[in-house]
Image: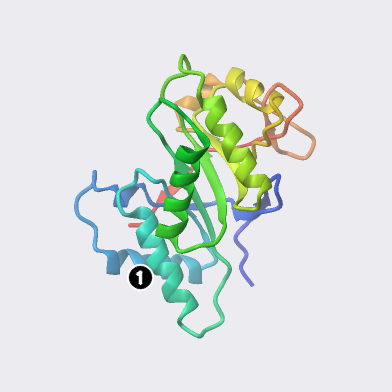
C-alpha cells in the first residue's frame, strides 16, 4: 500500500499531496521524448505518486498523459487509479458555452478520459470579467458529470471570494511560490489552508517535474 500522503478535495477526488508536474514537456525546456516521459510516469505511479498536473497549453502534456493512460488500461495488469489535473487557459474574450465545452472536450480526447478529474482555470486579465462566464459554464459541465473538480490557478483572494459567492464550488487554487504571498490565507482547525472567507480552498505551490 502506498504511503504517499493524500488529501480529498471538495468534490470527493482524492489526490496526492505531491503532484507530478508536466510543465517540463511544454517545449520550453527542449524536446521531450514521449517514450521517456511515459516511462517516467510509470515509475512515479509505481511509487504511489499517481496525481499528474498538466495544462492545455503545456504542449503535448495532455496527449502524453493520454498515451500513458491508454497504455496502463491495455496492459492487463492491476494498475493504480490515476488522478489527472489539467488546466484551461483561454485567451480573454467571449466565453460562450460552446467555446468552453469545446476546450473541455478537446482535453478529454487528448487525455483519453470520459470525465475530467479536475479543471484548473487560469485567466490573464481581471479587467475582462468574462472569466465569470467561463467558470459558470465549467460549473454547469460539472453539474452534468463531465468534470469532477473545478479549481483555479494564481487567482487572488478578492476574485476567489467573488467566484465562490456566485455559487461556484472551487476545490483548490494552485499558485506559484511568489504569488502565495499576495493572497490572504489562514489555517482552519482541519489544517486546511483557506481564504479569509468561509469557503475552504486548498492552496498548492509545490509541484515536481517529470525529469
Q: Find residue 126 and report its horizontal and vertical position in percent.
A: 48, 18
Q: Residues within 10 Å of mark 1 (few under 14, many from 20)?
A: few
Identify the image quadrant of the N terminus. bottom right
Which residue corresponds to mark 1? 39
Q: Find residue 2 and report its horizontal and vertical position in percent.
A: 61, 68
Going by the image, does 63 lie left or right of 115? left
Q: Where, by quadrant of the figure, is residue 57 drawn?
A: top left
How many discs mark residues in the rendered view? 1
- Any part of residue 174 in sight: no
Seen at 46% across and 14% down, the residue is 127
157 vs 75: above or below? above
Q: Residue reaching furthest right? A: 189
Seen at 58% across and 68% down, the residue is 81
Seen at 19% across and 50% down, the residue is 30
98 vs 41: above or below? above
Seen at 34% across and 46% down, the residue is 58
- Any part of residue 152 in sight: yes
Going by the image, does 175 lie left or right of 172? left
Q: Find residue 115 and report its horizontal and vertical position in percent.
A: 57, 57
Q: Residue reaching furthest left? A: 30
Q: Residue reaching furthest top? A: 127
Q: Which residue occupies the foreground of this view, 197 or 169?
A: 169
Going by the image, does 145 lie left or right of 36? right
Dot 1 lies on which element? Answer: helix
Coloring scheme used: rainbow
Identify the image quadrant of the C terminus. bottom left
Q: Find residue 23 and report its horizontal and vertical position in percent.
A: 35, 47
Amino acid at each position: 500500500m502506498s504511503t504517499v500522503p493524500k488529501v480529498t478535495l471538495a468534490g470527493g477526488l482524492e489526490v496526492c499531496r505531491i503532484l507530478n508536474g508536466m510543465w517540463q514537456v511544454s517545449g520550453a525546456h527542449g524536446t521531450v521524448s514521449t517514450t521517456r516521459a511515459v516511462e517516467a510516469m510509470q515509475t512515479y505511479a509505481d511509487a504511489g505518486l499517481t496525481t499528474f498536473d498538466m495544462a492545455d497549453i503545456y504542449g503535448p502534456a495532455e496527449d502524453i498523459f493520454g498515451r500513458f493512460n491508454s497504455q496502463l488500461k491495455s496492459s492487463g495488469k492491476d494498475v493504480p487509479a490515476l488522478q489527472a489535473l489539467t488546466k484551461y487557459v483561454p485567451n480573454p474574450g467571449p466565453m460562450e458555452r460552446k467555446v468552453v465545452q469545446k476546450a473541455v472536450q478537446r482535453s478529454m480526447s487528448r487525455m483519453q478520459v470520459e470525465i475530467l478529474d479536475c479543471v484548473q482555470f487560469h485567466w490573464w486579465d481581471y479587467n475582462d470579467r468574462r472569466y465569470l462566464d467561463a467558470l459558470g459554464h465549467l460549473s454547469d459541465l460539472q453539474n452534468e458529470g463531465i468534470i469532477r473538480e473545478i479549481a483555479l490557478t494564481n487567482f487572488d483572494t478578492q476574485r476567489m471570494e467573488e467566484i465562490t459567492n456566485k455559487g461556484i464550488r472551487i476545490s483548490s487554487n494552485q499558485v506559484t511560490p511568489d504569488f502565495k504571498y499576495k493572497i490572504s490565507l489562514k489555517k482552519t482547525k482541519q489544517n486546511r489552508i483557506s481564504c479569509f472567507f468561509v469557503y475552504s480552498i486548498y492552496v498548492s505551490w509545490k509541484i515536481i517535474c517529470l525529469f
